[in-house]
């Protein structure tokens, strides 16, 4: 994965003003996002101000946060109603960030109901464990069961940091990746920043999300980070084209040829 994979730019960068955030923790009281609905309203206002038009609420489905599709839909509906009352023109869709450790326990029908926007794409949380055997087989096994897989924050996963070729094989097998915007600007450290940019240059990144948890410390911001990282020419593809296709249940569209900064 080198700078030789950078493509030439064709045309100016698109003006992005209607982004879709496929991964955020906006729902109140069910995971490590806002504790109250007022906090979620402040979160939504910040997202709207940052250029978002749709948020996919992806609360954790894990041992610590054993959420299910019915709970997520109920809380989403209540928050959407509150946003309408507050005249906040932001659409909320349901999804989940599913921990690998919960996958064996989730029935097939329930797993299908946890897809992003109700579609076939599952957002699977990449583990932060220093070592995890069988990761590639587990993920390919999910795909063989008929699910589409999008990996959340692979740039922060120690397994992929040690073996980026594994991630490349997964992408070749039809698995998509979604990195966190803050990773591109050093929010999670310099090594994560460098690895995230390396993955972008190697065309192993399909989407950038906020992975926001609150309106201040981890806010719903994506475009500012893309611009700081020199990735504005890809912003439209990363935050509109790909998310729209994912929510329609389609394949990831081809990445446009653009010039990007050299590491």
Image (tube, rainbow, N blue to C red):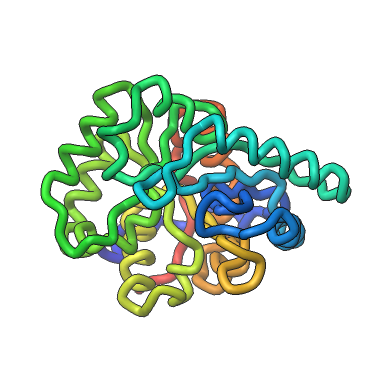
Question: Is 257 located above or below residue 259 in the figure?
Answer: above
Q: Say whether residue 175 is left or right of residue 119.
A: left
The answer, for residue 19, to whether it is visible in the render is: yes
Q: Residue at x 75, y 46 (%)?
A: 90
The answer, for residue 9, to whether it is visible in the render is: no
Question: Is 231 located above or below residue 56 in the figure?
Answer: below
Quarter of the image where one finds residue 103: top left
- Most extreme residue toward the left is 133
Q: Residue at x 38, y 58 (%)?
A: 200
> x%, y% of residue 219?
61, 66
Pick whichever, 230 or 120, lies toward us: 120
Pick whichever, 21 or 218, lies toward us: 218
Quarter of the image where one finds residue 244: top right
> x%, y% of residue 177?
38, 47
Q: How many marks?
A: 0
> x%, y% of residue 231?
51, 64
Pick whichever, 141 or 191, lies toward us: 141
Q: Residue at x 15, y 60 (%)?
A: 131
Q: Quadrant of the C terminus?
A: bottom left
Q: Quadrant of the N terminus?
A: bottom left
Q: Residue at x 43, y 49 (%)?
A: 65
> x%, y% of residue 212?
56, 60
């Amino acid at each position: 994965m080198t700078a030789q994979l950078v493509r030439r730019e064709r045309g100016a960068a698109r003006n992005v003003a209607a982004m879709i955030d496929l991964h955020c923790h906006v729902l109140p009281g069910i995971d490590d996002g806002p504790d109250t609905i007022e906090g979620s309203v402040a979160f939504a206002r910040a997202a709207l101000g940052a250029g978002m038009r749709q948020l996919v609420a992806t609360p954790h489905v894990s041992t610590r946060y054993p959420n299910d599709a019915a709970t997520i839909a109920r809380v989403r509906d209540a928050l959407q109603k509150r946003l309408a009352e507050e005249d906040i023109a932001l659409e909320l869709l349901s999804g989940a960030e599913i921990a690998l450790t919960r996958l064996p326990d989730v029935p097939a029908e329930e797993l299908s109901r946890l897809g992003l926007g109700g579609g076939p794409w599952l957002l699977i949380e990449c583990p932060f464990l220093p070592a995890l055997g069988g990761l590639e087989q587990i993920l390919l096994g999910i795909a063989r069961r008929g699910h589409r897989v999008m990996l959340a924050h692979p740039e922060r996963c120690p397994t992929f940091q040690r073996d980026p070729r594994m991630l490349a094989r997964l992408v070749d097998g039809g698995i998509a990746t979604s990195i966190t915007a803050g990773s591109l600007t050093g929010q999670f450290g310099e090594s994560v920043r460098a690895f995230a940019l390396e993955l972008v240059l190697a065309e192993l990144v399909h989407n950038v999300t906020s992975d926001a948890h609150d309106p201040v410390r981890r806010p719903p911001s994506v475009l500012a980070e893309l611009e700081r990282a020199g990735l504005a020419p890809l912003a439209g593809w990363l935050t509109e084209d790909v998310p729209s296709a994912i929510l329609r249940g389609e394949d990831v569209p081809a990445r446009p040829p653009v010039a990007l900064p050299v590491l």
